[in-house]
Image (cartoon, helix red, strand yellow):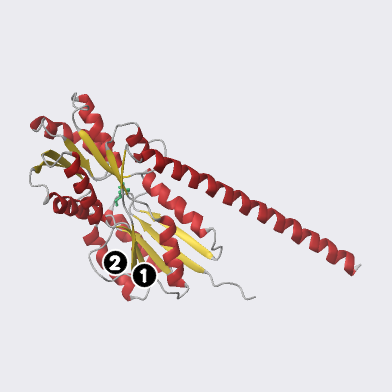
């Protein structure tokens, strides 16, 4: 059999500074373990758009076979993705989009639908009437724009639910701790805060608690990660009323990339589904993710066992060969 062709995949990641991005990388590595002929290079832009632009230029110079991009800010990253695409390098956009159609495939959640699902849930939780605050992700990032848009769309059906204030949370908890107190003091009668991710939602809860509002104000987030500080745990501990599942999509991104590299049919838009997780279903969700994690552990152990057996087999064969030659 001829050796499989070697490929280099470059991943321009907007940041690695949170558990959600780390879960994404774990998923990618798991899928990459099936393709030993692929070299995977990650460049972390540390939430810095100018750095991400330079890193994509470096990838172009290094002549990668395929580029995966999660754009820190949509507009300024667009021309670089277009350049890669126009040079014939396939580009998979992962989670944070650019503003043009010049890319090979998208993998990630439908963020407008995330916002709409949140809006529908909030509308019925508040029985169609109430005041809410929105804590936004970074202004230039497509998920923040789309989640905001979707929320307002869904709230059209609940004309008596009003968004009375906004906080720029920049995806980070510290920004919320700094900016939310002043807004909450202006609107002490809000019933709910919708934050564009669970880290900011946790910050919102902490601010409410400081101001003695934690019992009165619902907090809803996005992501629904497993793990100690993850959204599932926060919902189970009643810190968040709900979270909207938003999968990191690492496995799916690599799977799509490999289809493209192998010239197999693929979809341009690969939407990962969302759902509301609240007290009614959080235990089921946790049990399922834990079961998945333990099955993945089993698979890894089996792979290691197979690998060991292969080594033993190869050395035994060598032994036989030497005996035969004697
Ligand atoms: C992680 C993150 C998630 C959020 C996503 C949006 O870096 O901030 O919390 O859902 O990015 O792109």
Quadrant containing the N terminus in the rendered view: bottom right
Looking at the rendered structure, the secondary structure element under dot 1 is loop
Q: Separation of disc 2 and disc 1 at Cα?
A: 22 Å
Q: Which residue, given by chain and number where applicable, does mark 1 sit on? A: 267
Classify 10 Å Cα crowding around label 2: few (below 14), some (14-19), many (20 and above): some
Given residues 270 and 173, the one toward you in this image is 270
Select label 2 or label 1 by which is in front.
1
Q: As drawn, is 262 to the left or to the right of 185?
A: right
Does residue 140 appear in the picture of this structure? no
Q: Is residue 268 above or below residue 244?
A: below
Q: Residue furthest right?
A: 326
Given residues 245 and 253, the one toward you in this image is 245
Give the numbered dot on residue 80.
2
Q: Residue at x 62, y 52 (%)?
A: 302
Given residues 269 and 122, the one toward you in this image is 122
Image location of residue 221, percent across then percent down: 27, 42
Q: As drawn, is 324 to the left or to the right of 38?
A: right
Query: Is tag 2's residue or tag 1's residue first in the polypeptide sequence?
Result: 2
Q: Is residue 7 above or below residue 303?
A: below
């Amino acid at each position: 059999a001829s050796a499989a062709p070697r490929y280099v995949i470059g991943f321009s990641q907007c940041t690695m500074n949170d558990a959600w991005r780390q879960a994404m990388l774990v998923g990618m590595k798991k899928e990459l373990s099936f393709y030993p002929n692929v070299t995977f290079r990650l460049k972390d832009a540390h939430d810095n758009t100018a750095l991400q632009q330079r890193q994509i230029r470096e990838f172009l110079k290094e002549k990668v076979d395929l580029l995966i991009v999660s754009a820190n800010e949509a507009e300024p990253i667009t021309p670089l993705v277009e350049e890669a695409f126009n040079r014939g390098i396939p580009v998979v956009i992962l989670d944070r989009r650019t503003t043009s159609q010049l890319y090979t495939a998208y993998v990630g959640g439908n963020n407008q639908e995330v916002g709409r699902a949140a809006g529908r849930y909030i509308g019925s939780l508040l029985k169609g009437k109430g005041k809410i605050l929105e804590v936004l992700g970074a202004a230039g990032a497509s998920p923040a724009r789309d989640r905001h848009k979707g929320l307002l769309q869904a709230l059209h059906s609940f004309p008596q639910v009003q968004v009375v204030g906004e906080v720029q949370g920049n995806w980070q908890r510290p920004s919320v701790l700094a900016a939310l107190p002043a807004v909450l003091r202006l609107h002490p009668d809000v019933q709910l805060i919708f934050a564009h991710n669970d880290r900011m939602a946790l910050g919102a809860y902490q601010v409410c608690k400081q101001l003695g509002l934690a019992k009165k104000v619902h907090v809803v987030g996005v992501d629904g990660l497993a793990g100690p500080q993850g959204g599932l745990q926060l919902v189970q501990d009643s810190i968040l009323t709900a979270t909207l599942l938003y999968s990191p999509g690492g496995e799916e991104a690599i799977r799509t990339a490999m289809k493209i590299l192998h010239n197999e049919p693929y979809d341009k838009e690969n939407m990962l589904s969302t759902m509301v997780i609240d007290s009614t279903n959080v235990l089921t969700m946790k049990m399922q993710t834990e079961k998945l994690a333990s099955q993945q552990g089993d698979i890894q152990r089996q792979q290691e066992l197979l690998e060991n057996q292969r080594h033993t087999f190869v050395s035994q064969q060598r032994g036989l060969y030497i005996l035969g030659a004697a």
